[in-house]
């Protein structure tokens, strides 16, 4: 039975990390003392849920956490520092501090070390998240003990809702564009002027019409999507922003 450690101090552990081709030791005191820290722990680097959702969403919401009093966000996994470093390069993780709990000492001290030998993983961390203030656990979200790899409560949105229920999350914006298109340039400038962080997806002539037709019902670029909904081209975007 996995038990919450709310009200208890985090384990006193030293982590061995590799930075700039040199070994370095980081202690839990350095990570937690005098700080408000969010921790999310997961079964392993490069695994599907961890890479597709868990890490990227915490990274995306990191600026919102920061605005609401969180000093740092730690990603803990029972992996060595080389694996964690390579995973960080491969992922959207620039806002996250990656913590390699290679020996599982921190995870064991949290009571979250589980046996995954059936998968060939050995001892790994159960998936959970927690809010820690000055080294003391304030809140834990522990995934239910059920088969597989449940991912229901340790996500970034759940943690943010606990810390700041009314916090505004960043809009997710994609612009399907054409190279050299003046209307596309106008749409992107409008987004820049209004403080939107967006992904630009330039399409070449061979696929542009069919792809845009399939996703938006329109054949011309640009086509702008905000939070999963089609806004349209530059003029439609201007009207949307003027509301």
Image (spheres, rainbow, N blue to C red):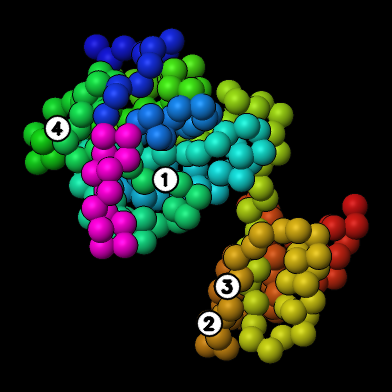
Q: CA distance from mark 2 to mark 1?
A: 39 Å
Q: Which residue is mark 3?
A: 201
Quadrant location of residue 237? bottom right
Where residue 61 appears, as percent x and y from the top left, is 57, 44
User: Which badge, 2 or 1, comes first in the chain's sequence?
Assistant: 1
In the image, what residue occupies the spot 48% across and 23% down? 134
Q: Main secondary structure of the magenta part?
A: strand
Q: Residues within 10 Å of mark 4 (few under 14, many from 20)?
A: some
Judge depth for marks 3 and 2 and give the one in front: 3
Instruction: Select label 4 or label 1 by which is in front.
Output: 1
- Indicate which label's residue lies in the foreground, 3 or 1: 1
Residue furthest to the right in view is 242
In the image, residue 29 sits, relative to residue 6, either above or below, namely: below
The one nearer the camera, 110 or 154, is: 110
Q: Which residue is mark 2?
A: 207
Looking at this view, is 26 or 224 the one in front?
26
The answer for how far apart the CA atoms under marks 3 and 4 are is 41 Å
Task: Name the spot of residue 178 as percent of width and height, x first.
Answer: 64, 83
**Mark nearer the N terminus (4 vs 1):** 1
The disc at residue 123 is: 4
Position of the N terminus by quadrant: top left
Q: Please give the residue where the numbered disc 1 appears in the rendered image.
A: 97
| Residue visible at 74% across and 79% down in the picture | 185
The part of the chain drawn in magenta is 14-27
69 left or right of 101 in image: right
Residue found 57% across the figure and 80% down from its top: 203
Disc 2 crowd, CA 10 A, few/some/many (<14, 14-19, 20+): few
Compared with residue 28, is residue 25 higher up or lower down, i.e. above or below?
Answer: below
Q: From mark 3 to mark 2, how far is it between C-alphas?
A: 12 Å
Dot 4: element: strand
- Left or right placement of residue 47 versus residue 173 in this view: left
């Amino acid at each position: 039975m996995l038990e919450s450690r709310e009200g208890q101090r985090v384990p006193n552990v030293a982590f061995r990390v590799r930075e700039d081709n040199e070994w370095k030791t980081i202690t839990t005191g350095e990570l937690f003392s005098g700080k408000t820290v969010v921790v999310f722990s997961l079964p392993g680097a490069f695994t599907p849920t961890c890479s597709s959702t868990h890490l990227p969403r915490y990274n995306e919401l990191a600026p919102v956490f920061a605005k609401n009093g969180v000093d740092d966000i730690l990603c803990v996994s029972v992996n060595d520092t080389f694996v964690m470093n390579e995973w960080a390069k491969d992922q959207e993780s620039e806002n996250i501090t990656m913590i390699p709990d290679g020996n599982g000492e921190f995870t064991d001290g949290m009571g979250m070390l589980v046996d995954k030998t059936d998968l060939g993983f050995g001892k790994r961390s159960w998936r959970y998240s927690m809010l820690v203030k000055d080294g003391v656990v304030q809140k834990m979200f522990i995934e239910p003990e059920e088969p597989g790899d449940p991912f229901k409560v340790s996500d970034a949105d759940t943690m943010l809702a606990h810390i700041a229920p009314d916090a505004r999350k960043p809009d997710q914006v994609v612009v399907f564009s054409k190279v050299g298109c003046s209307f596309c340039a106008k749409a992107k400038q409008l987004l820049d002027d209004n403080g939107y962080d967006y992904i630009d997806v330039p399409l070449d002539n061979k696929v542009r019409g069919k792809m845009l037709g399939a996703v938006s019902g329109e054949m011309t670029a640009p086509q702008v999507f905000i939070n999963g909904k089609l806004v349209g081209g530059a003029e439609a975007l201007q009207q949307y922003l003027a509301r």
